[in-house]
Amino acid sequence: MEQTPEYQYKIASKGKRLLAHLLEGIIYLIITLIYYNILGNSVDDYLNREVSVKEVLYSALASIFTGLVFYPIFSGNLGHKLLGLKVISSKSGKDYNYASDGAIRELLKYLGGFLIIPVLWLLWDKENQNLYDKVTETFVVENNIEERE
């Protein structure tokens, strides 16, 4: 599906969604490495560490925090903002900009990443939705309304 005519937005391509996800991951990795360095550890220490349950919980909390902070501002996360994308409700077409909704969506994205299937779902979905988009009833769209001809 190229466009949602009822909402006048173009659905974001699979490539743009993937790139937004990668950019966001790179930003958070850089922030993590800077923080790790401030604590007096090297990048090698970070890369060779064993991942603990505590780190997984902190990452889950960070995803909730991301949704709480960025969705009210950008209707999406940092990757969406950098690529001119935003999240809208698939039911109403309105911006998905409530902090609690963003927190739930980002947490589902984070937790779903462990299962891989929700991430791969995007590859065959006609509306370019991931499984967490289906659950939260959202679309990721280009952030500009197209002119009707």
Image (cartoon, helix red, strand yellow):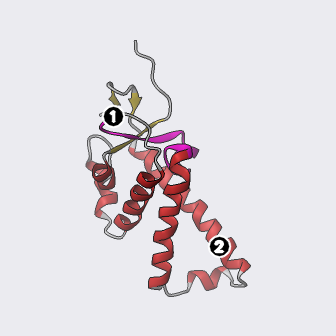
Residue labelled with disc 2: 33
Residue 147, image x, y percentages? 45, 18
- Return the disc, 2 or 1, that comes first in the chain's sequence: 2
Specify few, some or many for label 2: CA neighbours under 10 Å numbering under 14, 14-19, or 20 or more: some
Image quadrant where residue 46 sits: bottom right
Quadrant in the picture for the N terminus: top left
Quadrant in the picture for the C terminus: top left
Identify the amino acid type marked 2: Leu
Q: Nearer the viewer, residue 106 or 130?
A: 106
The numbered mark at residue 92 is: 1
Residue 16, image x, y percentages? 46, 44
Picture residue at 39% right of the left edge, 25% below the top: 8
Residue 110 shows in this picture: yes
Image quadrant where residue 42 sits: bottom right
Picture residue at 54% right of the left edge, 86% below the top: 49
- In terms of secondary structure, where does tag 2 sit? helix
The residue segment tinted magenta is 73-91
Does the stretch in magenta take in 18? no
Residue 22 shows in this picture: no
Q: How many numbered discs, if any?
A: 2
Residue 5, image x, y percentages? 33, 24
Q: Nearer the viewer, residue 125 or 28?
A: 28
Residue 13, above or below 77: above
Considering every residue shown, the one lying at the far top of the view is 149
Does the stretch in magenta take in 80? yes
- In terms of secondary structure, where does tag 1 sit? loop
Q: Is residue 128 left or right of residue 95?
A: left
Identify the amino acid type marked 1: Ser
Specify few, some or many for label 1: CA neighbours under 10 Å numbering under 14, 14-19, or 20 or more: few
Residue 108, image x, y percentages? 36, 61
Q: CA distance from mark 2 to mark 1?
A: 40 Å
